[in-house]
Image (cartoon, rainbow, N blue to C red):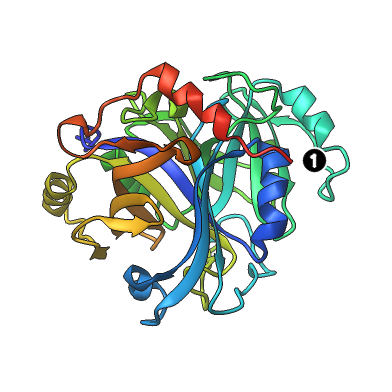
Amino acid sequence: MITSTMSKIHGIQHVGVAVADMDRTLPLYRNWFGLNIPFFDGIQAAPLMQVFTNDTVISKRASMVMNLQGGSAMEVIQATSFKPKPLPSDFMLGDLGIFAVHMRTHEPHRALQSFENNSLKPGMSKDPLGKQRFVIQDPDQLFYIAREDHQVYAPSGSVLGGVGGLSVGVSDIEKSKHFYALLGFDQVLYEGQGVYDDLKGFPGGDQDVQRVILTSSQVAKGPFGAVIGYSLIELICTPLRVGQKIFRGRIWGDVGFVHIGLDVVDMRGLAAQLAQKNIQLQCDSQAALSMGKTQVHCAYICDPDGVLIELIEVYKIPLIEKWGIFLNVHGKKAGKALPNWLIRLLRFSRIKD
């Protein structure tokens, strides 16, 4: 059995999504995905990302948003020091990197009806676990999978919840399965090979693929563990075709799903555990970084195909900034769950369009 580092990794905190126009995208994501609870929104230089930006310090606007109905958050990013390159037009299923993000829905048919006018004209199908799902694209041609998931934290009326997982193209299914197990995704829900009806919404979706669906043996912990619950990571490999990297010729901040953010506690202890498994930190802030009034300790690792994984130890974040309510979880409070009444107060910071 593979020993995970789940004791120090609390699950998927967020997924990083780089877009061409945040003023267009943020209202759309509020409408589509109910991502209307903001944590921060600001413009800042990103010197820590030089390893992933060709040794150039870029600046970007970033906004962290969540849906209290349940699921992980999303960090929406727009480069401000350069014009982001679009996704490659020749993307095919099996190319390497994050190619789709899963959004929860406990009412899949109602959710499908709300997307009838989407340019992709989605159709419902079932995944190997028997869950209904459909594929949509945003204006940047990013793929989202609305997937049946009955984990609901606080009903909001939204037909879709927050992030429930992601799909990753990999070059070696066994190597990637082992890697993500070390990060806590140690339960195999499905493993098989073939042509799948629910993948036919993607370019090249009629290929023969190897497919693994992973989850964690433990529910997410940490301050927002009750909201996040259980997440999925789906691995896709095309054994008859060598996948290209989705970010080939592009940098962090160009359009696409740029990273997975994992909530961690005890960064130093985690780094030592990862080193024992020959997983090295690519870069490390060494101490708390400030993003507005948010303070976090960030470090980065990569999966076997170069997918960027952000490790985030939260020190301080604004819960309801206008009321002066902040979450300070460094020290003895690290890793502790927030009480439900405090999380539910976040509804008062909801952005209404």
Residue 289: percent from left, percent from top: 29, 58
> In the figure, 94 relative to 90: above or below?
above
Q: Residue at x 37, y 69 (%)?
A: 49
Q: Residue at x 45, y 29 (%)?
A: 228
Q: Residue at x 78, y 24 (%)?
A: 110
Residue type indicated by callout 1: Pro
Residue 263: percent from left, percent from top: 33, 41
Residue 259: percent from left, percent from top: 44, 56
- In the displayed orientation, state which residue is furthest to the front: 323
How many numbered badges does the structure rendering display? 1
> In the figure, 128 relative to 42: above or below?
above
Label 1 Cα crowd, 10 Å radius (few <14 / some 14-19 / many 20+): some
Residue of label 1: 122
The secondary element bearing badge 1 is classed as loop
Q: Tell me if 83 is positioned left or right of 164 in this view.
A: right
Name the one closer to the observer, 185 or 117. Answer: 117
> In the figure, 341 relative to 238: above or below?
above
Residue 284: percent from left, percent from top: 23, 62
Q: Tell me if 95 is positioned left or right of 230 in this view.
A: right
* Residue 203 in sight from this viewpoint: no
Name the one closer to the observer, 15 or 327. Answer: 327
Question: Hey, which quadrant is residue 278 in on the image?
Answer: bottom left
Q: Classify the position of the C terminus by image quarter.
A: top right
Name the one closer to the observer, 139 or 319. Answer: 319
